[in-house]
Image (spheres, helix red, strand yellow):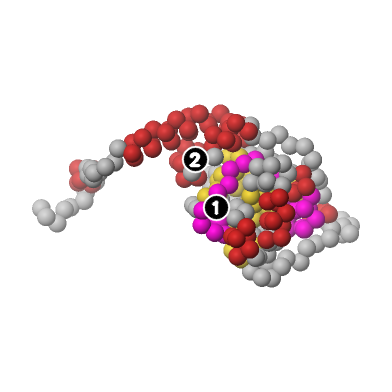
Amino acid sequence: MAVPGLHRHPNQGIVHTVIERVDSLTVKKYSDVYSAFVVDHFGKHPAMEVGIKPVAPGMKICGPAVTALGADLSVRRMAIDLMEPGDVLIVAAGNPSNRSCFGDGTALRMSTKSLGGAVIDGLTRDVDGIAELGFPTFCRGATQRNYHYPSDGEHGAVNVPVVCGGVLVNPGDLVIGDGDGVVAIERHLAEEAVDTIVANLDAEREMRAQMTSYEPFGVEQELRSRGYRFASD
């Protein structure tokens, strides 16, 4: 029950059942792009904080965001019910330091729906089970201790703008994650930039394929011009 007179954020207690997702063709084109290359193009602001990492090596995500505000179990379950194949669950759990708010049971249920993965601004449990399942899960760490879920619906919301890992994520935004971490790109920006990013990535791969012998970087003159002194002089 809500406390009379208590301040309530406008987004709390709201469930948006319909969202506009990043275009499916755009998602497909980004599926082969690594997160650091995205940051090279958009700058550092889409990159979530360094603490959010995959629970096991090799996990990757690329799909539209469905957001859950808070760590409330029922709110998160409502978000999962609304998700479509390929969607990525974003749980803005507020970074609880000693409680988990995700586990392999939820991961298993999500995998049966062909969902794209989960990003938790907090902790998970059942890491071994999630790794065995292979469900892409990104979070800040793990603990056996479960979160004490609130029963008041005003503690959370579904498909509202949230902050996850220090980055603003809107429902339908593009979320990409790999071994370096997670980035979230505003839907329209992702769609507008995709062809340029793919072309640049192809050019980078072609250039790297030609690296069959060592080529010096050739920065000596630059360093000398900046005042560096070489001991061999």
Q: Position of residue 12 (x, y in %)?
A: 79, 49
Which residue is drawn at the image coordinates 69% and 70% (left, top)? 145
Q: Quadrant of residue 5?
A: bottom right
Q: Position of residue 212 (x, y in %)?
A: 26, 42
Q: CA distance from mark 1 to mark 2?
A: 14 Å
Q: Position of residue 88 (x, y in %)?
A: 65, 46
Question: Is residue 91 a member of the stretch shown in magenta?
Answer: no
Which residue is drawn at the image coordinates 80% and 45% (left, top)? 15
Give the residue type that dot 2 points to: Val
Question: Is residue 71 a member of the stretch shown in magenta?
Answer: yes
Circle 2: element type: loop
Considering every residue shown, the one lying at the far bottom of the view is 145
Mark closest to the chain's N terminus, 1 or 2: 2
Which residue is drawn at the image coordinates 83% and 54% (left, top)? 153
| In front of the other: 130 or 64 | 130
- The N terminus: image quadrant: bottom right
Give the crowd class for mark 2: few <14, some 14-19, many >=20 residues within 10 Å: some
Circle 1: element type: loop
Give the residue type that dot 1 points to: Met
Q: Is residue 182 left or right of residue 230?
A: right
Q: Which residue is mark 1?
A: 59
Q: Nearer the viewer, mark 1 or mark 2?
A: 1
| Res. 33 mark | 2
Magenta stretch in the rendered image: 53-78
